Amino acid sequence: MVPLGQGSFAQYRTETQDWMAQHRAFQSDEHDSELARNAPMEWRPAQPARKGVVLFHGLGDSPWSFADIGQALAGQGFLVRTALLPGHGTRPADLIGVDLDDWRRLVAQQAALLAQEVPEVYLGGFSTGANLALEYALDHPEVAGLVLFSPALKSGVPLDWIVPWVARVRTWLRQPDSAQPQQTPLRYLNVPTNGFAQYYRSAAAVREKIARQPYARPALLVLAQHDSVVDVEHVLGTFETRFTHPASRLIWYGELPAGRDAAMPQRESTGQHTRVLVRTDKLPQQRISQFSHMGVLFSPTNPLYGTEGTQRMCWNGQDAADQARCMAGEPVWYSDWGYRESAKVHARLTFNPYFDWQAEVMREVLAAE
């Protein structure tokens, strides 16, 4: 497991990268690039920072999740760091022995290291990482604010509660085989059952905590209506009732459930904000059928996941013929996992056409007192 307990972020990054170099199942011949993209990262602003943020990735992902968000936050004056959750960055099987408390220790240590350098500490995360950031912030009121992308407070899978029990008797929900890749240069594609069990524990813990104690500091939450991982209506309801700061915002990509008030673009231009901001996720001119769990994170200019990126995600819940067409480089549409439409091949949407607008909303939220 990645070593923890370092006295500085530089030491943590070096030791983590050395660990990965020894244990990683490399997916390309570009070992240095793979290590750099999976290792903890840091961005420093042009001027000395008074504010800093640590960002935590999701289950099966890597610090590359924040390649664009990190740069945006540094441009807004933050000292930005990312961390690598234990069990990640090497091979999926390394998640078999990981416990939720390992992830919690990482969050606590990185928050403490950042507090040594800046007086105002913010936290952020994607999916499972958002759960970890929120749970820590609820216990530590000195955390100045949060940025939570696709926060997985509740799974969209109805029987997720059974996974910790299944993990005791079944190592993999989908047994590794040579027919499908197990990971890419940036993330895992298959996760052992224990990984899902620890995610479930993180979600259950943070739901219980926020039900008792609202979050009163500024927070930005970002959700996609058609997220195939998260129960987004649960997260929306939690935001409306438990994230109480008036400057907090939730960005919703898609159509809100009936009866929800939202600040549509024409209302935003008049300054008559509500706290939920909506953008459509159907953009046929860009061949986007719907937004995805991960797509909210990346700029269209990202060299790997952007519109011209090299990491097209063709394994997207389609049949073998459509997957083969995608992998052959044919023109595709974009969606979240599992979406199908006649006569269209869908790759995963891995970029956000609204990224610059989203970054501006993030700046406004984090500037609030």
Image (cartoon, rainbow, N blue to C red):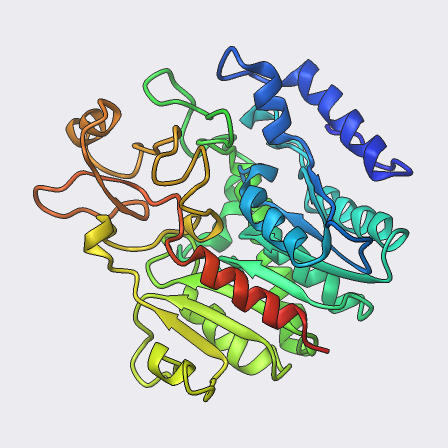
Look at the picture and state if 258 lies above or below 278.
below
Residue 131 lies, in percent from the top left, at 61, 57
Residue 3 lies, in percent from the top left, at 80, 30
Q: Would you say residue 201 is visible in this rendering?
A: no
Residue 34 lies, in percent from the top left, at 57, 22
- In percent of the image, x 62 and y 17: which residue is there? 32
Front-most of residues 102 and 216: 216
Front-most of residues 114 and 269: 269
Res 320 → quadrant = top left
Left/right placement of residue 105 relative to residue 71 reads right
Split into 4 quadrants, where in the image is the C terminus? bottom right
Look at the picture and state if 272 lies above or below 66.
below
* Extreme residue in the left direction: 343
Res 220 → quadrant = bottom right
Q: Would you say residue 342 is visible in this rendering?
A: yes
Front-most of residues 267 and 349: 267
Q: How many marks?
A: 0
Look at the picture and state if 322 lies above or below 111.
above
- In percent of the image, x 42 and y 55: which residue is there? 159
Left/right placement of residue 73 relative to residue 153 reads right
Residue 345 lies, in percent from the top left, at 18, 38
* Extreme residue in the front direction: 46
Split into 4 quadrants, where in the image is the N terminus? top right
- In percent of the image, x 63 and y 26: which residue is there? 36
